[in-house]
Amino acid sequence: MTTTNQTTWTAESVAAELIRCETERTDREPFTDDWPDLDVDTAYAIQDATLDQRLARGEQLVGVKLGLTSKAKQQTMSVDSPIVAWLTDAMVLPTDGPARVSDFIHPRVEPELVVTLAHDLKGPGITPAQALDAVASVLAGVEVIDSRYRNFRFTHQDVVADNASSGAYLSGPIAKTVPEVDLSLEAVLVEADGKVINSATGAAIMGHPAEALAAAANMLGARGITLKAGWVILLGAMTDAVPVQPGTTLAFHYTTLGSIYLSWED
Amino acid sequence: MDDAVHLQAAAVLEEAYSSGVPVPPLVESFPGLTVEDAYAVQQVQLASRLEGGARVVGYKVGLTSAVMQAQIGVDEPDYGFVTDEMVFLENAAVPVVRFLQPRVEPEIAFVLGRDVAGPVTVAELLGAVEYVVPALEIIDSRVADWKIGLVDTVADNASSGAVVLGSRPTHLGEQDLRLAGCNLFVNGALVGTGAGGAVLGSPLTAALWLVNTLGARGVTMRAGQVVLSGSVTASVPVAAGDTVSARIAGLGTVTTRFA
């Protein structure tokens, strides 16, 4: 790569570079190194441009994911709101065999809670209770995050542009309705090769996952975008992300939403 | 090491209890102290409390999380005794002056319905458990700045302080203790979350380890005694004026306040 400076970057060229990194499984330094004035609005414009490129190659938009939903992570990034990013059908992990580390740059895995929507949700002004009312079903979920930035070094703007480190995801085996699950106490026990390494509950997602869903509706609403009936929403990580290597088998056991197993090979 | 050393080390800790001033790690003051010595030091303190009229109402299991075990550099838990004067009623004010550097942990507590002497199988233990309650354990260290390794925490009664048992008993058969969620709140703010399995894979494993370890030492656990199985989340520091509440799926809530 030749050295670039801020005058040469546009939302489109940054988006193209991010998609290139993702396709070629190569990482790079964050754009804010040579575009220090990159603001959050522009970062979301870049993220939208990456979506356009995904759709142009035939992918379908299936929903959104939230990032930075834990207080600890928000404090690390000096922000007080989460990030919303796009999900397409190409990001769904196949379940017919192990995931491949080589399909990613430096994958890490996070347990999540997932909802699908029965009704549209259009912010601003959506409350957590209204957000829950739009939910069709609640599922366990696992997200493989994968930053295009070397060593996960990035600013808030960089990670917004990079579609919140999206990689791949899969949802769990059991769908429940909102009244059937106590989302704040639904727990996940994380095992790596049979050994418990972490645990958390839904409350780790912004105090309650409904807060995250309302935040997604309101943040997108401010950009004139509606959360659509049928969409899948990844509400945010419950624990720290787990780095994986070939040979690792992860298991995520949920209180009432079943278990998800994810093995890794080269 | 001989009994005289055990008595001396116990006296150092007892002095810290009564003065409220933490002491340097025992491994520095008594070089060569082993884990077995540490349990002997714990026994000396228990004997003097029993002499003073206290009685053992249960035991606590410590060092049960992957994080704590990695921090201390062990792959086994430890235990300490719980006497009647260490137990506080739910919602009653707990005076922080009793402690040197208190922290709180949410736990699942087992109450035995009959005597059980290890070694027993998990099935036999299940048969002896009458019910489970949510609990808050106030941990404390008589060692300055919590600078503890395995030997120091064992000698210091597994860094125990006090226990608050929840008032709603449920039957074990109705609970999935391993996957039960737990949220810990201090003054209404969420400070930690976890699942029961954070405790050695299951709180039941911790209880079984305790019964069998005590059994190997010739100690029978008695009907009515309590097993505090270990913290589900990281511990948090507390001060006078704090209200701490834990909510555990299936078990309900337990609340305590500090004055």
Image: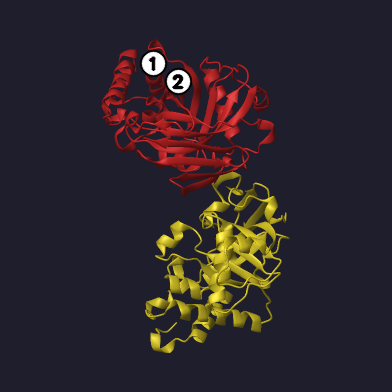
Residue B49, label in figure: 1
**For mark 2, does the 10 Å Cα neighbourhood hold few (<14), some (14 to 19), or many (20 or more) residues?**
some
Residue at 45% x, 76% y is: A40
Q: Amino acid at mark 1?
A: Arg
Instruction: Name the side, left or right, on which A261 lies relative to B159.
Output: right
Residue B243 location, quadrant: top left
Colour assigned to chain B in the rendering is: red
Confirm whether residue A108 shows in the render.
no
Pinpoint residue B85: horizontal percent, then vertical percent: 42, 21
Question: Does the residue at mark 2 contact the one at mark 1 (Cβ under 8 Å)?
Answer: yes
Q: Quadrant of residue B171?
A: top right
The picture's colour for chain A is yellow
Identify the amino acid type marked 2. Thr
Quadrant in the picture for the C terminus of chain A: bottom right
Pinpoint the chain carrying mark 2: B
Which mark sits nearer the N-terminus, 2 or 1?
Answer: 1
